[in-house]
Image (spheres, helix red, strand yellow):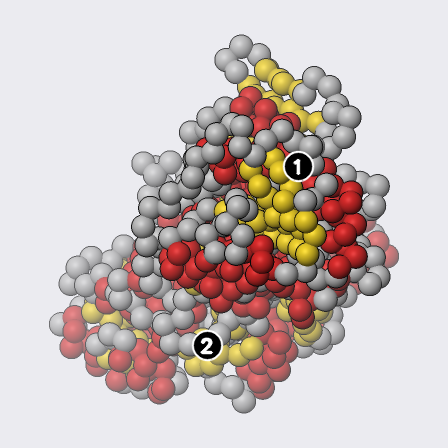
Amino acid sequence: MKQVVQNYKSGELAVLDVPVPGCKPGGVLVRTAYSLISTGTELMKVSEAGMSMLGKARSRPDQVAKVMQSVATNGVPATYRKVMGKLDSYTPLGYSLCGVVEQVGAGVDDVKAGDLVACAGNEHALHAELNWVPKNLYTPVPDGLAPRHAAFGTVGSIAMQGVRQGEPQLGEVALVIGLGLIGQLVVQLLTAAGVRVVGADPDPTRCELAERLGAAACGDPASTAVEAAVAELTGGHGVDQVFLAAGGGSNQPVELAARLCRDRGRVVDIGKCRLDLPWNAYYEKELDVRFSRSYGPGRYDPAYELEGRDYPIGYVRWTERRNLACFLDLLARGSVDVEPLVSHVADFDDAVETYQSLKDGDLKAVAVLFRYPEQAEEQGESAAPEVSVPEVRRTGTTVAPVRSAKTPVRLAFVGAGNYATSMLLPHLAGREGVELSTVVTTTALSAANAQRKFGFAEATTDLDAVLGDKSIDAVFVVTRHSSHAELTRQALLAGKTVFVEKPLALTEDELAGVLAAVEESGNDRLQVGFNRRFAPLLQEARKRFGARTGPASLRYLVNAGKLQHGSWYLQQGAEGSRFVGEGGHFIDTASWLLDADPVSVYATAAPGNEDLQVVLRYPDGSTATISYVTTGAAGFPKETLDLIADGKVLRLDDFVRASVYSDGTVGRKQWVSSRLPKARDKGQNAELAAFIKAVRTGGPMPVPLESLVATTSATLAVRAGLAGGAPVTLARAR
């Protein structure tokens, strides 16, 4: 992934390729949509980095004191190496962003993959494509709030904590000195709280902006305009609070605060300005000087920020996280408006040039946002694109004939390739009550081979003859992927019960065509070859796991491996991607275990190969993460699965071993499959048995058509998710 960094020794700014952070317990992995440049704090750091070593020392006397202490303890050589090593390292920039939860760590239950969140922290909400953010430093974004506005959450919390420290009351008058980003937000928060505000800033454009956003009057602090406005609004008594939101080395803000504050008023320092308090002025008025520590209570407390230990609300009403949530609520309700503060939106790839323009003064801005590559700059943008899951419509009730036990079910196969001949036909040939009637292939020899090996009554290349044969009960479509949807459509219209090997369709249009055939014919007798839910070992493990009451987390690792050169699976232009071809297997298995259809899909791909991470979100908050990898070791099992919920864990090891763990009231309970099966049974035999039973009895198909459609839509949505870089909502068609 990419991240903005700076070398504090040389001042170099860069966008580096760095590893993706891991998703540790107690936090979430967030893919950034927008991050905000703090034109005060960050530009100060950028400017300091460009100074000489002497200049750096003068600007940070606190750090110089630490260096001198280290010299006394460790000596000059060791201290020099330590300091130079630290200076000559890349450090991150940024601390306020909005993004989409990509992965949820253990212990987090208030957000899910696909949720939009605002994040804070100069170690966690960085200018980077992905960030790991601990629980107390993010909060969900209210519905309807644009991501670019939610990216202001951290600076909004800083302004809010400053306002809280001032303890404003309805009808009071406040003075805000410094109308940069924080100052503009303080003005709006005070106005929303029923306080009349006077602003002071030497920049006339910032004064005009503050007045548009609610300030009663603004002006240059060196002029008489500010003093006159204060005198008029307060009857000459002075303001109730002064908020210092200015920076720099001038002592003017502190002196102006003393002059314009009323007797026993409050002065709150929010920014980083010089604080040489004139003793007489502050003593005579007995001014209450307060400091506002960043985002609020919890800041700089590792137990709160990193370990997720919240402060009881009865003792600490407003914490970092509660301030963050409160500010977003004000934005969502229109009490605060940040859009007028956005001076510029830059592409993340242009970060270095943007910082340089700000530093040089070519770009004059109150607030600048970085827009990440996946974000489309659209009015009323949505956090998650939407894909419609087609509605299954039937013209009438499908009535399938009931066959007597003595009458065989007559089957036709369209296609007789490797999968048909190795995984399906061996379970059907010689099965009691089944007659292999006809095999259809495009080449005569392959049909003849299948007829000879499995005992088909007829072999042909004429599909129409098979579809027109009323004695054939069911048709198996086992051809290449590109023909599945069309052959299925034709067979449904011919009134046949259909078993189609996955995938059902390669595109949304193909899926719609199949469903149009269902609606036109009234024939919904369809099964897709999602066999894993029928695997005996997985069936038993699910039974042992039992019912669950809370959301579950499912992890499915598919070690797919490399394809052999020349495989038709590589013909993606004609046959679809490899995941579209077989990904439905894993999505169907997850949905069956979670007993629901997914409502959103997020997908990301490793650059340069076919490795995918697919995150599915379900209605009850459950998530399923499918890691589909082609770069693993060939000797490692192909499929491993873990289902975790309610203090229980189901483990499946490549369909040869399964186990269930649970913590009961009396000790630990455990089930492990009693013996290893002789061969991996992925459920084909049981699936075919269920299909044949449905054909024979006229009963319901083994898997509801709505579930087959939902799984297919979710599989196709992976492609849309990869293209858009954002979660895709699976909306049911109305």
Q: Residue at 68% of width from left, 41% of height from top?
A: 424
Q: Give the vertical position of 395 relative to 250 (above or below).
A: above
Which of the 4 image quadrants contains residue 206?
A: bottom left
Q: Residue 366 location in percent, x, y?
A: 43, 78
Q: Give the vertical position of 222 relative to 82 (above or below).
A: below
Q: Residue 288 location in percent, x, y?
A: 32, 56
Label 1, label 2: how far apart the Cα atoms are: 56 Å
Residue 152 in the figure: left or right of residue 444: left
On-image quarter of the N terminus: bottom right
Residue 107 got which mark? none
Which of the 4 image quadrants contains residue 211?
A: bottom left
Q: Residue at 51% of width from left, 60% of height from top?
A: 490
Q: Give the vertical position of 494 relative to 249 (above or below).
A: above
Numbered disc 2: secondary structure: loop
Q: Amino acid at mark 2?
A: Glu
Which of the 4 image quadrants contains residue 24?
A: top right
Q: Residue 203 location in percent, x, y?
A: 39, 85
Q: Nearer the viewer, residue 260 or 586?
A: 586
* Residue 344 seen by the camera: yes
Residue 176 in the figure: left or right of residue 321: left
Q: Pointer 2: residues within 10 angstroms few (<14), some, or many (20+)?
A: few
Q: Amino acid at mark 1?
A: Leu
Residue 428 got which mark? 1
Q: Residue furthest left?
A: 235
Q: Residue at 53% of width from left, 79% of height from top?
A: 346
- Residue that carries the numbered disc 2 in the rendered image: 377
Residue 641 in the figure: left or right of residue 384: right
